[in-house]
Amino acid sequence: MAVAMQGNYNKPAYERARKKVKDIKSFYINLTCYCIVIPVLIFINLYFTPHYYWFFFSMIGWGSGLLIHGLSAFGYMPFMSREWEEKKLKQFMEQEQQNKHRHTNGY
């Protein structure tokens, strides 16, 4: 079915949309794992070492990564977005062209 759908759209737009869906799916899988594993860690911590709450380290560390993953997947990170990447690529390509032009003209 994916091949049939691909024929109905232009290829670059289809590939971008497909990557976006894959990124969002990856985020939801990560979120599901977080929601399963963190309560298990909390239980293990409170059952075996109730005097020291070490589960906070995992919860905050993984949660921070999860937050960044979500922001990236849903397009809320302006410095990591596709538009930012394309703008930087264009900027570097223009600089390369200017440097090449300078060298060929003897500057």
Image (tube, grey):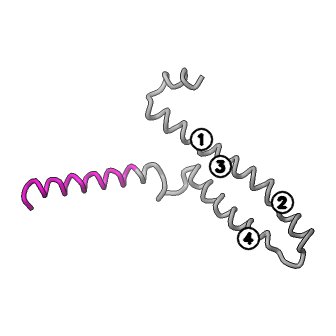
Query: Residue 5: horizontal and vertical position, in percent?
Result: 54, 24
Tell me the tag on residue 27: 3
> Earlier along the polypeptide chain: callout 1 or callout 4?
1
CB contact under 8 Å: marks 4 and 2: no
Query: Residue 17: horizontal and vertical position, in percent?
Result: 53, 37
> Could you tell me what secondary structure mostly forms the magenta stretch?
helix
> Earlier along the polypeptide chain: callout 1 or callout 3?
1
Question: Whole-Å distance between the Cαs marked 4 and 2?
Answer: 13 Å
The residue under the point 65% across, 64% down is 64
Range of the magenta residues?
A: 86-107
Image position of 78 (left or right of 107): right
Name the element at disc 2. Answer: helix
Residue at the disc numbered 2: 39
Question: Whole-Å distance between the Cαs marked 2 and 1?
Answer: 26 Å
The residue under the point 46% across, 34% down is 13
Residue at the disc numbered 1: 22
Question: Whole-Å distance between the Cαs marked 1 and 4?
Answer: 29 Å
Tell me the tag on residue 57: 4
> Earlier along the polypeptide chain: callout 4 or callout 2?
2
The residue positioned farthest toward the left in the image shown: 106
Image position of 27 (left or right of 89): right
Q: Amino acid at mark 1?
A: Lys
